[in-house]
Image (tube, rainbow, N blue to C red):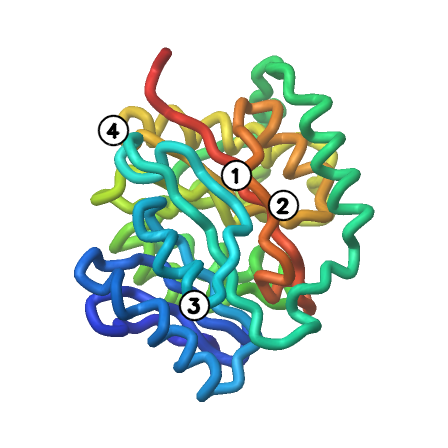
Amino acid sequence: MPDVIEKLDHSLIQHGPDNDRIYLMKLAPEDAGALPARLKAMAEEKGYSKVFAKVPAGAEEGFLNVGFETEARAEGFFRGEQDAAFMGLFLKPWRRECGHAARVAAVVAAAKAKACPAPEIDFPDGYECRICEPTDVQAMAEVYRVVFESYPFPIHDPAYLAETMAEHIHYFGVWADGRLVGLSSCETDPAAKNVEMTDFAVLPDQRGKSLAVALLGRMEPFMREHDFRTAYTIARATSFGMNIAFARAGYAFGGTLINNTHISGGFESMNVWCKPLAEA
């Protein structure tokens, strides 16, 4: 059974055994005082090894007081005006140990070293990019099944893709000769005016063509036109390609979330990158 998304008091959380954690996705302001302790108690009761929370910087102290640590920050995360703290509470020792610390450090160093603006990259001739429609969800799920053995959200399920497409996620697809070969998504928070650039997946036989970079180049203008003010991503910390792509696109490194996500068959640390979308 996949992790569930539900309300805790007035706030939105995801939790379950797949990721072995509670993820505070959206903190309701009225819950800021009591929720940190409630999250800790719930995680202890269910035996989870981590609580991950995205909170306004103004609420950070309440989480620190019950044992959370600030793992990363994102500037202007809320409406382009207030920063976010990405916080972790580790309840089991193994969860705070990064098994690939040297590689993670090398990835961040390489990304920062290549952060100079890159030339715009478009799709190869014959490739079509467009926003996905409900009729695409079966093909989308198949791409995600091929690329990701496991994932923190049920993107292998066409029904989930259709539901989120109708609510708050814009999926972008790339087709070659009528076949869907690459995907990404813009997961929006309209109230906070931020968007997560995520769910990048390119079929193995299509890699090396910079399709993910070209997708990002289409996603940003679309979200800017819809008045979103901040874009961010939570990228696999051991992936040179994706971290360098975001650094070269002008995203600033915010920190590393240790053993945060169960993806492609195991727990992985994730890097936070953030960028203002407002025109200079």
Q: Which residue is mark 1?
A: 174
Position of residue 199 relative to residue 267, above or below, is above
Within 10 angstroms of label 1, few (less than 14), some, or many (20 or more) residues? Answer: many
State the mark number for residue 227. Answer: 4
Tell me how far mark 2 sits from mark 3, CA to CA. 41 Å
The quadrant of the picture occupied by the C terminus is top left
Instruction: Name the amino acid type tagged 2.
Output: Val
Q: Secondary structure at mark 1?
A: strand
Q: Secondary structure at mark 2?
A: strand
Q: Is residue 201 left or right of residue 107?
A: left
Within 10 angstroms of label 2, few (less than 14), some, or many (20 or more) residues? Answer: many
Tell me how far mark 1 sits from mark 4, CA to CA. 24 Å
Query: Do labels 1 and 2 touch, CB within 8 Å?
Result: yes
Residue 252 location in percent, x, y?
54, 29
Q: Which residue is mark 3?
A: 66
Q: Earlier in the sequence, mark 1 or mark 2?
A: 1
Instruction: Name the amino acid type tagged 4.
Output: Asp
Q: Earlier in the sequence, mark 1 or mark 3?
A: 3
Query: Do labels 2 and 4 touch, CB within 8 Å?
Result: no
Q: In the image, what residue occupies the spot 40% across and 81% down?
A: 42
Q: In the image, what residue occupies the spot 22% across and 59% down?
A: 28
Q: Is residue 56 left or right of residue 151?
A: left
Position of residue 36 relative to residue 72, above or below, is below
Query: Which numbered mark, 2 or 3, is in the foreground of this view?
Result: 3
Instruction: Name the amino acid type tagged 3.
Output: Val
Query: Which numbered mark, 4 or 3, is in the foreground of this view?
Result: 3
Q: Is residue 168 left or right of residue 239?
A: left
Query: Which numbered mark, 2 or 4, is in the foreground of this view?
Result: 4
